[in-house]
Amino acid sequence: MGIFLLNISFNFEYLPLLIVVAIAWLVPMLLSVMRLQRIPAVILEIIAGFFIGRYLLFHSSAESMEILEFLALTGFIFLMFLSGLEINTDQIIASFPRRKLTLPKVLKNPLLVGLLFFILTLTLSYAGASALSSVVYIPNIWYFSLIMVTTSVGIIFPVLKNRGETLGDFGQMLIMAAAVADILSILLFTFTAFIISRGFQPELLLVLVLFLLVYIFYVLGRRLEATIFRRITFQLSHAASQISVRGTLLLILVFVVLAQILGEEVILLGAFLSGLLLSFFLHKERSLLMIKLDGMGFGFFIPIFFIMVGAKFNPAHLSEFDNSLIPFLVLLLILLFLVKIVPAFLWVRLFGRKRAIAGGFLMASRLSLIIAASTIGLGLGAITEGINASFVLMAVITCLISPMVYNNLNPVDKKKSRKVVIVGGSSTGVLLARRLKVHGRSSIIVEREKLRYNDIKRKGISAFRGEGTDVHTFWKLGLQASDYVVVHTGNEEENIRVCEMLRKEFRHEKLISKSTQSAIEQSLKRLNVEIMDVRRTLAATIENLILRPGTYHALVDTFENYIVEEIAITGKLADGIQVKDFHFHKDCTLILIQRGTDNFIPHGESNLKRGDVLIVFGTDTALEDTRVRCSG
């Protein structure tokens, strides 16, 4: 008999949930201990789910399994929401063609190339699915081909981010192609699922209500941003009410509930569109809310989804293929790679054959969407149990192979020299050049005025006389992809012109400029320029002078003697040892350790790991000693 308190029943079995949550906690811990961080955690979650489903959950009550399935469905909804949220809507809008199109312009436009990539992939997938249907029985060839079109932004984005390629033209091409594949795949899944389950009915047009809702919410959101609503939201965001998180959950549920009314097949699209809508509004506050939403999604709900996928995976379903199992799996795996590698030749003209093929392999990584699409297809009868099991297997294999092949075909060139090009010889540019020299970084100032150019040269600072908007200036400087370009001409409109030229002509990614107005900031943001907000920088400086003047002057006024620097641990000697055993130089202090997206204050017993970034403070000699120790 259950215990009741305030009409809440305690008669629920929490053991199955405990097992699932324990697996979700244990998997990333094991990957870290075994130093296998490159393997996506979800793969081990699926594998672990398979074993606990066979040996630990099989005796659970129907009610407990129903609760787990509800949490798994919520995780699935969160996954689709976060997939929509990851899409850079500003980049998509900026890629809309505004002038007469020519072939070179089409091939340089990430959105148009992404659309061509998707069309080619879909064509090849349908042809491949038709060919495979002669080997095994496929109930719905069109739906089968849609499953093969999917890709995984969740795999592609972290790989590019770790290599520092997310802002480059090649990285943007890959991210845009993956985003287009996500959006169009989900749209086609929704309409196809609706037609399979109900046929061509007028109700199909009701799906467009979701898009109308996106527009209405977007217009309302823009108006509310400039009202008292924004102030109240800011005040309550960090209080116990956590109003921004609650508002996000409300947004998700509005779209999901409406999608449920239209039909179960539309839930996927509803969750995705709610994330896409929110991505229009998240800019500078994005990181804070994203941390909270990632914590809810990837910290609890999403792992349950993948573990339950593994728990429901039944290898016995593969027996339906009999003697054709091995040929089918081999052909399917080859086909999953080919449908992405062949369209990747669209990038050959811009990036070379080897790099384009590497991008095709990375695009072939599939994870959440292929599993979701396969699960939906199984429920619709569009694919069989054996095909569903095969796609789950393929998701694991492609996620293991694709990133490794990409890194091998497109290695990071660590030998390239790095310099900083400063466009504009103002006093700020000269001071920056001096400070960089103290840190041992070479820099060169681009200045067009003869008198200022000569004055910079007399100060012993490297300079080049030329126009910052002239492409030949940077050809003569030998600009490399690893070089930073700081654009500080004194005229913000000219800053935009310089950045635009560097992005379009050189496809350069490491650009830094400043903004004092929202319009300038938006223009620079569309060009993927790293922005220094002068207003916030000035406010932070004044804040430091008021709250911590001693520390501020110690860091700023004595920079020629003491420096704060980031030093990455790349060698084996420092890997795994404790901070107290590292033996820092006497003039060096460890302030902070960055591990992935986490920061923590170190203690003597804290373990260092390869890949950690140490934030250290000390003299140049002491920091050089630390760099040697970290790379040894």
Image (tube, helix red, strand yellow):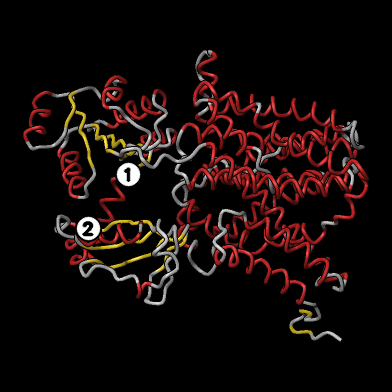
Left/right placement of residue 145 relative to residue 139 reads left
Q: Residue at x 13, y 37 (%)?
A: 461
User: In the rendered image of this protein, does residue 285 appear above or below residue 420?
Assistant: below
Disc 1, SS: strand
Q: Residue at x 58, y 25 (%)?
A: 113
Left/right placement of residue 61 relative to residue 92 reads right
Q: Position of residue 276 (x, y in %)?
A: 61, 43
Question: For the residue carrying disc 1, how many other residues have a C-alpha within 10 Å: few (<14), some (14-19), or many (20+)?
Answer: some
Left/right placement of residue 90 relative to residue 429 reads right
Query: Considering depth in this image, is 88 or 157 the residue closer to the camera?
Result: 157
What amino acid is found at the position of numbered circle 2 in the picture? Ile
Q: Position of residue 611 (x, y in %)?
A: 44, 57
Residue 18 lies in what quarter of the image? bottom right
Q: Is any atom of residue 103 visible in this view?
A: yes
Quarter in which the C terminus is drawn? bottom left
Question: For the residue carrying disc 2, how many other residues have a C-alpha within 10 Å: few (<14), some (14-19), or many (20+)?
Answer: many
Q: Residue at x 70, y 31 (%)?
A: 338
Quarter in which the N terminus is drawn? bottom right
Q: Residue at x 84, y 39 (%)?
A: 328
Q: Which numbered circle lies on residue 563?
A: 2
C-alpha gap between disc 1 and disc 2: 21 Å
What amino acid is found at the position of numbered circle 1 in the picture? Met
Pick whichever of labels 1 and 2 is earlier in the sequence. Answer: 1
Q: Is any atom of residue 70 visible in this view?
A: no
Q: Position of residue 222 (x, y in %)?
A: 52, 42
Residue pointed to by mark 1: 532
Query: Considering depth in this image, is 222 or 111 the residue closer to the camera?
Result: 111
Query: Considering depth in this image, is 383 or 66 the residue closer to the camera?
Result: 383
Q: Which numbered circle lies on residue 260?
A: none
